[in-house]
Image (cartoon, grey):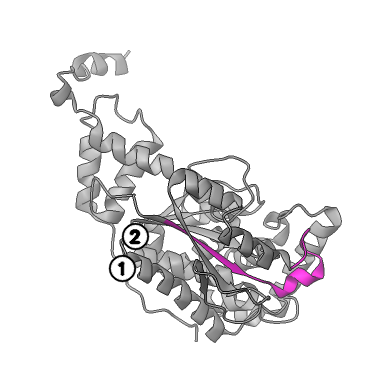
Amino acid sequence: MAESIEIYIPPLDDGAMQMAAARQGRLTKPAGSLGRLEELSISLAGMTGRLDPPLANRIVFTLAADHGVALEGVSAYPREVTAQMVLNFLNGGAAINVLARQMNVRVVVADLGVHSDLPAHPDLRSLKVRRGTASITNGPAMSVREARRAIESGRRLVRDEVANGLDVALTGDMGIGNTTASAAVICALTELDSKDVVGRGTGVDDAGLDRKREAVRTALRVNAALVATGPIEALAAVGGFEIAGLVGVILESAAARRPVVIDGFISGAAALVAASIAPAATGYMIASHRSMELGHGAVLRRLGLRPLLDLDLRLGEGTGAVLALPLLEAAVRTLNEMATFDEAGVSERDQEAAHNSSHN
């Protein structure tokens, strides 16, 4: 019997969405002329129950863990880089730190399963399940119990921040080998072939790409029985601790009616698991961008999400999610601060002329 998680995801606020749509129709612009910004403002109203949701307290949850499969030549970088990059995050020197400072975002760094011992740091949340996963090519990455523990750790991170006034959650990751694990999770949940999902990750050469594809194929074969049981079991079989933690971040954000901005490929794999556990969670997801990773477009299509940006990103860390924040702000501000036709004394569309033009 498949494992389940007890969580209630509230429905979107249909009344707030109707109010947002009605106001969009009265603003001083042709209907639909702000395109995706209009859709985004309506979605945010549905998530939060407000036409003017606050976006000031924004946090990117950058979760880190190591992967046993990294020792099989699937990455251009050695496993030690995971711990080194966590220290870089804590020192403020990574891309996510630079962008977060620009966008006024707080970075919450959490160790879900880094192989190395990390020094105590006031900005590091130590939630290590264990020192990295086992190689997915030999059997399950983790036990189902460990997967649930990592999911719960992600949920707890969000609960703590909601209590402190969190307005919007963003997902981020760090883990050498995690594009391989994420590809395996995506293949497990979508039944897509590895050749259509596995990409170059950190920039492996052709031989490295072949090793990644073979590792995913082997992992799915070796773990076939567990993968077929359910989404939590599939996550335990071929995923990673940071991926599981992000599942918890996404689920708890949705449960708390907070928008959750999904980053790239690894976050996309976590979102796919979260949606499989609680389909209503997709209503609270905003796809920040389309990653360069091969299978990311397929993930977004499965989730029914359209990315806001397409910048050829493939870094992770939460960088794409942070870059999308100004669009959320623009959507809310245009809905609330633009004048309506009545307020501005601007004539609305000539309905008779519009009717005639449609018949010519």
At a point 71% along the width and 82% down the height, the residue shown is 139
Q: Is residue 190 visible?
A: yes
Q: Which residues are magenta?
A: 59-79
* Position in image of residue 323 (x %, y %): 50, 44
Depicted 249 relative to depicted 298: above or below: below
Q: Is residue 277 visible?
A: no
Q: Quadrant of the C terminus?
A: top left
CA distance for labels 2 and 1: 7 Å
Q: Secondary structure at mark 2?
A: loop
Are there few (<14), some (14-19), or many (20+) residues within 10 Å of tag 2?
Answer: many
Q: How many numbered tags mark residues here?
A: 2
Q: Position of residue 31 (x, y in %)?
A: 29, 28
Front in this rendered view, residue 183 or 150: 150
Q: Mark 2 touching mark 1, by CB under 8 A?
A: no
Q: Is residue 256 above or below residue 133?
A: above
Q: Residue at x 50, y 87 (%)?
A: 1
Q: Position of residue 103 (x, y in %)?
A: 45, 45
Q: Residues within 10 Å of mark 1 (few under 14, many from 20)?
A: few
Q: Is residue 147 magenta?
A: no
Quadrant of residue 344 within the rendered picture: top left
Three-letter amino acid code of the residue under disc 2:
Leu
Identify the residue position indicated by label 1 in the image: 163
The amino acid type found where label 1 is placed reads: Ala
Relative placement, left or right, of 81 versus 226 is right
Residue for point 72% across, 75% down: 68
Label of residue 166 in the image = 2
SS of the residue at dot 1? helix
Q: Residue 268, percent across and down?
A: 54, 58
